[in-house]
Amino acid sequence: MDCQKEKNLKSCNCSYEPCSRKGRCCDCLTYHRRNRELPACFFPDRAERSYDRSYEHFARLVTAGKV
């Protein structure tokens, strides 16, 4: 399977500019899963910019109806 990096970048809202995984979703998911986190694309832009990608933060957003 070929990575569709350019296509993926169109919907990637990661605001961490030096990220080497941008557009490479399989690498991004692997990295964040290892750290008990979700990638930026699971979060609304404002929440993503906090860089709190924890499962707990995501659950709070879901409970508050923000996701």
Image (cartoon, grey):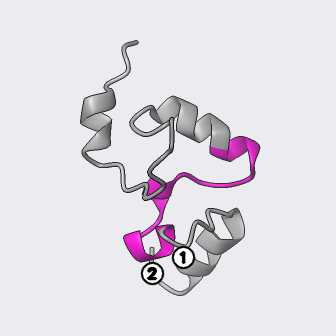
Quarter of the rendering containing residue 33: top right
Of the numbered discs in the image, which one, if any, rests on residue 62?
1
Quarter of the rendering containing residue 8: top left
Residue at image coords 47%, 35%: 25
- Asked whether disc 2 touches disc 1, contact meaning CB atoms under 8 Å apart, the reply is yes
Of the numbered discs in the image, which one, if any, rests on residue 66?
2
Outermost residue on the right side: it is 35
Q: Amino acid at mark 2?
A: Lys
Outermost residue on the front side: it is 18
The secondary element bearing badge 1 is classed as helix
- Frontmost residue, 7 versus 59: 7
- Frontmost residue, 6 versus 26: 6
Residue at image coords 51%, 36%: 20
Q: Is residue 23 above or below residue 54?
A: above
Q: Position of residue 48 (x, y in %)?
A: 49, 67
Write the start and end of the magenta stretch as one range: 32-48
